[in-house]
């Protein structure tokens, strides 16, 4: 098994472990929402920025979902940027019975007072990479449109980024966007091909590993019993998912694909099989469009940040040593509830905007900001 060598440690302050800056590129999305909650609850990292991409919903709606989710956790410090509209991805109709019309199970979230930042997701990513040269880590849980555009606009980006974790693709597993392709790659195969061709350290977390782990009804109930608004919202989102799967497969459980990818990127999950493979993407107009295909790489792989790595090569996570679900649930449950404001002018307004029965009502307050 080939693996990335350990990078030179960054300096610490006052004996504390270094805080890792992370840019999240996502398409919320119920499993994206789980990934976001996991990252918010993870010590030692800092979400420096979040960009949205057209996936389950359009990028602007995804940005509204993200801002509203951050509001449930009291995290108004994280900039959120809208990615470019992708008509190809937008044309791929999601299943409303699974994701809801708003992408998050038609759950009513507290409406954030914030709007997306003026810069695009691509501009935000490039700016953060220059502000944190050699340190910024990218976690991508949706189509790779924004990352490919950033590579086009700033060819120096691979040298500046510490590592990239992509949740997508399939090695031996069947696709979930047709027989061959995984949905994130299939949404924009050309963008995925560009991202894998760049000389930055990439780890791919495909369906082979994510589909093998499940959140169950007992996990949903644990989230529902939490005092945190974020956890309660996630419980109702999972309820929409579980109802869909119960109807179609008689099982109230789902694979937390994006949360697993994000958790692995933080180091919270231990790999069992993770070879270095050469990755290609089918960009033809044929039936295999969006399929990822792989070849074994022999010998050690050079992946230090300054010199990059061989294009198209990536670590590919195929299995974990332990079930990921308990770790995911434990971390998300540990997310601290949002601090209540003591200002009399805002507390009543917040209470009025966030009625607790709204989650169960299945209504949507998630609109493009």
Image (cartoon, helix red, strand yellow):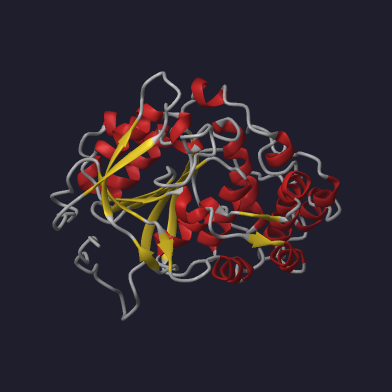
Instruction: Name the foreground residue: 321 vs 287.
Output: 287
Where does the N terminus fall, quadrant-wise? Answer: bottom left
Q: Which of these two is toward me, 19 or 348? A: 19
The number of numbered badges drawn on the structure is: 0
Q: Quadrant of residue 329?
A: bottom right
Residue ranking furthest to the top = 285
- Please name the residue shown 17% across and 48% down the image: 308
Horizontal side, residue 121 vs residue 12: left or right: right
Answer with left or right where residue 107 lies relative to residue 74.
right
| Picture layout, residue 103 above or below residue 250 | above
Query: What residue is at 23 percent from the left and 43 percent from the top?
Result: 158
Q: Position of residue 26 (x, y in %)?
A: 50, 43
The residue positioned 79% from the left and 48% from the top of the image is: 353
Q: Nearer the viewer, residue 64 or 269?
A: 269
Q: Give coordinates of residue 240: x percent, y percent.
A: 75, 47
| Up-down relation of residue 86 to residue 41 (above or below) | above
Using the image as rendered, state which of residue 59 and residue 128 is in the foreground. Answer: 59
Residue 77, can we see it? no
Task: Give residue 206's position: percent from left, percent from top.
Answer: 43, 49
Residue 86 visible somewhere in the drawing = yes
**Compared to 211, does 5 lie above or below?**
below
Could you say where residue 123 lies in the image, as x and y percent from the top left? 37, 35
């Amino acid at each position: 098994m080939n693996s990335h060598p350990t990078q030179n440690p960054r300096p610490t302050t006052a004996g504390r472990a270094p805080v890792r800056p992370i840019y999240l590129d996502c398409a919320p999305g119920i499993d994206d929402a789980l990934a976001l909650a996991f990252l918010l609850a993870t010590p030692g990292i800092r979400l420096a920025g979040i960009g949205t991409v057209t996936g389950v919903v359009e990028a602007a709606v995804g940005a509204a979902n993200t801002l509203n989710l951050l509001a449930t956790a009291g995290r108004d410090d994280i900039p959120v940027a809208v990615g470019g509209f992708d008509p190809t991805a937008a044309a791929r109709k999601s299943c409303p019975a699974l994701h809801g019309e708003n992408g998050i199970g038609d759950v009513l979230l507290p409406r954030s007072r914030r709007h997306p930042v003026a810069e695009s997701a691509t501009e935000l990513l490039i700016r953060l990479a220059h502000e944190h040269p050699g340190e910024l880590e990218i976690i991508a849980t949706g189509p790779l449109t924004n990352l490919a555009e950033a590579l086009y606009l700033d060819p120096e980006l691979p040298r500046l980024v510490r590592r990239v974790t992509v949740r997508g693709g399939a090695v031996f597993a069947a696709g979930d966007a047709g027989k061959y392709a995984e949905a994130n790659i299939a949404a924009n195969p050309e963008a995925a091909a560009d991202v894998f061709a760049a000389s930055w350290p990439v780890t791919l977390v495909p369906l082979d590993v994510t589909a093998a782990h499940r959140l169950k009804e007992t996990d949903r109930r644990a989230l529902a019993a939490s005092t945190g608004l974020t956890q309660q919202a996630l419980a109702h989102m999972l309820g929409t998912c579980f109802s869909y799967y119960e109807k179609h497969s008689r099982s109230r459980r789902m694979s937390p694909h994006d949360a697993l990818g994000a958790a692995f990127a933080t180091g919270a999950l231990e790999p069992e099989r993770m070879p270095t493979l050469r990755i290609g993407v089918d960009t033809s107009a044929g039936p295999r469009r969006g399929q990822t295909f792989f070849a074994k790489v022999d010998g050690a792989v050079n992946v230090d940040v300054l010199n990059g790595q061989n294009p198209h090569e990536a670590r590919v996570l195929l299995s974990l040593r332990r079930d990921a679900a308990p770790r995911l649930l434990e971390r998300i449950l540990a997310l601290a509830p949002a601090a209540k404001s003591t200002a009399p002018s805002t507390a009543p307004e917040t209470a009025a905007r966030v009625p607790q029965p709204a989650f169960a009502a299945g209504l949507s307050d998630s609109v493009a900001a």
